[in-house]
Amino acid sequence: MTAEPASRSGRRRRGARSSVAAAGRSVDYRNLRNPMPPMAAFSDDEVEAIHGAALDVLEELGIKVLLDEARSVFRSGGAHVDDSTEMVRIGRDMVADALCAAPRSISMKAGCRSRDIKLELGRLVFQPGAGAPHTTDLKRGRRPGTAADFSELVKLTQHFDVLHMIPPLIEPQDVPVNVRHYETLRAQLTLSDKVPFVFARGTGQVQECFELLRDFRGLSDDDFHQRPHCYTIINTNSPRQLDIPMAQGLIDFARAGQVSIVTPFCLMGAMAPVTVAGALTLSHAEALAAITLTQLARPGAPVCYGTFTSNVDMKSGAPAFGTPEHFKASLGAGQLARKLGLPWRCATGSAANINDAQSANETQFGLWGSLLAGATVVIHAAGWLEGGLTVSYEKFITDMEVLQMVAELCTQTTCNVDDIALDALREVQPGGHFFGATHTMQRYQTAFYEPMAGDWSNFGTWTERGSKDANERATGTWQSILNEFTGPELDGDRVEQLMASIHKRTAAGGAPPES
Amino acid sequence: MTAEPASRSGRRRRGARSSVAAAGRSVDYRNLRNPMPPMAAFSDDEVEAIHGAALDVLEELGIKVLLDEARSVFRSGGAHVDDSTEMVRIGRDMVADALCAAPRSISMKAGCRSRDIKLELGRLVFQPGAGAPHTTDLKRGRRPGTAADFSELVKLTQHFDVLHMIPPLIEPQDVPVNVRHYETLRAQLTLSDKVPFVFARGTGQVQECFELLRDFRGLSDDDFHQRPHCYTIINTNSPRQLDIPMAQGLIDFARAGQVSIVTPFCLMGAMAPVTVAGALTLSHAEALAAITLTQLARPGAPVCYGTFTSNVDMKSGAPAFGTPEHFKASLGAGQLARKLGLPWRCATGSAANINDAQSANETQFGLWGSLLAGATVVIHAAGWLEGGLTVSYEKFITDMEVLQMVAELCTQTTCNVDDIALDALREVQPGGHFFGATHTMQRYQTAFYEPMAGDWSNFGTWTERGSKDANERATGTWQSILNEFTGPELDGDRVEQLMASIHKRTAAGGAPPES
């Protein structure tokens, strides 16, 4: 594990936009509000029925909680706990209290103020694909993820303003598990000033990451605890089970005032009922249990509701994403999130094995499901292939085009007298054209979104240029971004301190993950 | 020009679904209502401002109308007409009267009752890509369109229930222009029972097509005129010009009670102002002029409002589709259509040169623009490449997947006690799975949409099967559909009559197109 040379140097660097970005036109992609009208899958009564059924599940059936401490916390909060079966039954009053205590709006601190984000209903925050064991690109092929890949993907995430948080992009499998958390945090802090992710792999690793992050941001312990500076993702073991690292994560992040994004992963027909309503009932119950645990650990702790409910291929059991059922489940989850009033996380995805038309269509279809569901955070929005087993550099680029186009939709479409352009309509005669019109000349350089992955040249020109498809062209784009990458403005002393602390902790053996 | 052997034979054939379609699951894709909440680009005041400015354009600047008869019709209706400049200035009262007279709902007759469609706000009707000079597929390459290609694409259009109307798919350039309308009508009537398209290329061709269609459907002249049995698409020559065949088409279709879909093609920065509001003002003005002409020709004539407003690449002038500006223009057009209360036509599209991630992303992005704009008819929804210069067989298939998934969203997501599945949640223990649950076993065969173009197999299986991308796999799909095509149920006598009439008309020299 080594630090990038540039971040070791101690000089302050400018957060310059790469020349890969379009010149002339400037649109703020950093603070997005979702302009889409929310779409409903269910009637209000049906939403109440799902919510009520989820409360029944928690009260009557309960959830299995593998961590002793978590069961103790639940017991202290009034739950019926059976330590011999590890089952926890949670009353609806406890859930109601937790939902009262959980904040409706979460302000997260990034590495600089312009990267701070707010998580609340109505906001729109994007994350690229996450959690993949493999990575792939056309130059180097499909391979197990490495620390070098992780750093490159952090750079790509940093480059695009429309990505607001760093997720656990890929698993750097060349780094031993007891020191892997140092490397992923180092890459995030030194190559990006966006909100970083910390894996909930046991209290040991989590506390170390909190300390390293606290010191890198130059905060006191109190400052750090007052406001969230990082987040984790909590997956339940559906159905109805919360394992040790996840339960520890919920407690540790809550007590430290850091954000847990609760995401039951409920594949209809596999870990959840085969129906949208049934899978959502289970997902909702599990999310409510996890949210309740955070609020018992620290009332008012920042927590996001979340869901990842899609279906499987019933012939093979293979997971599928960006399907109609996935879309409908997202809509239903959005209705449940709005009922709770909490910020929430949704996801798109693709089961395709290559960055082709299927891959583009599934990811975009799932994206629209998330957007029309009114999701606050949309994860796996770029690069995610094979149902999450691989992050593709090229798909990262082609999906970014869609996210940037969505961000353009978040801007107002102006309609003043100049926009309506009666003067231009007077100027151009019937059958003429507007290319040279005064109105056009004043605006043409900034009027339109310029494509990054798209090639609008005609067939002849495109053929002369080598008949490259979007996937091939995207290789050049990510290579340029990485070659020209300058990274965020950093305090050299803090970087040195971070590296020294990591070296010391590494020498001491690191911290093993909890499993 | 030859008839397909099967349609000559005189035997009645069953409209059997191809075995390519999924078995077990049955969802009605023929009658769709748009379930998406409409999205606004403009405030109500801004919509009024655009409408008002469009009326100003018609009243003050006017529109150039190249057809003498159309100017006479406008003059009789009260317009200020200058025959020396061919300019027609249309008062807002005339437009208001026309908008009162135009029907809000249009019931169109197809070849069989289950293919009849209704055009009105709230309905959702899809058409594949249209009007391309070229066609392409991976087996035969990119080529000028032929009659054989046209027939094949009609078969593909017929195969998919989610396509409701046949558009002018590609231009069969191997058929002389004076008899080309016979061939395209023959293919549509004998290979499909969906609503057919007739090109407005002059009164001669149009009247012949009306006669052939009337006789093929076994109708009297009166019957035919009472109800629409076909439609045309009217493109203005933006800016502010209506050419001879288009003006003739508006009059001929209106008088015959057949449908004109009015579609100004306003590329921002080229044939229209560079702003969304300006381009929409022009598009709206031209559409209102054309609608007014139909209602002057025959009050109550069926007419669709329409728009195709996208932007160009301001560096090259190349048209672009599925862009943020295209999306916003669709939303604005939807607001204008709802203000008028008329059914309306919107479009998606792609400027990509191959069926890759760009192609999929642009077409789907434009599709969502159309859906959220509340479009009644969405054209170019499958197969359209190169900004309309080519229809791709493979893209036809991969885009169909998206349309079918959208059609799935039009179905209700049920949420009764059985769907919520508390029994299944009781049955499956924490950490278990639902694959074998009773609830799953009862439903798994029909629970989910089955992909047609998508491949959900894992990377290993996919690699063993030849690492085929979606584009390559789609070749097999369209080949199977064409190989197994059986076509609609036909009256053999009518087919023979149609062919005899076409032969006779062909021998007499056909009818030259008007230009």
Image: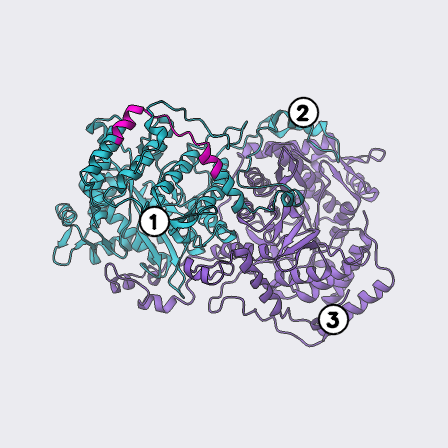
Chain colours: A purple, B cyan
Q: Position of residue A255 (x, y in %)?
A: 76, 52
> Could you say which is closer to the camera, residue B291 or residue B356?
B356
Please identify the dominant SS of the magenta region.
Answer: helix
Q: Name the secondary structure under disc 1.
A: loop
> Considering only vertical position in the picture, is B503 above or below B292?
above
In magenta segment, residue B487: yes
Count residues near mark 3 (Cα–Cα under 10 Å), then give few for <14, some for 14-19, many for 20+. some
Q: Name the secondary structure under disc 3.
A: helix
Check disc 2 and report the residue beneath it. B438
Do tags 2 and 1 sit on the same chain? Answer: yes
Q: Which residues are magenta?
A: B479-499
Q: Residue at x 57, y 49 (%)?
A: A121
- Mark 3: which amino acid? Arg
Check disc 3 and report the residue beneath it. A494
Q: In the drawing, does residue B302 fall left or right of residue A308?
A: left
Q: In the drawing, does residue B135 fall left or right of residue B61?
A: right
Q: Position of residue B393 (x, y in %)?
A: 44, 44
The mark nearer the N terminus, 2 or 1, is 1
- Mark 1: which amino acid? Thr
Determine contact: label 3, label 2, CB under 8 Å.
no
Q: CA distance from mark 3 to mark 2?
A: 58 Å
Q: Which mark is residue B307?
A: 1
**Tag 2 subunit:** B
Q: Residue at x 26, y 45 (%)?
A: B176
Determine contact: label 3, label 1, CB under 8 Å.
no
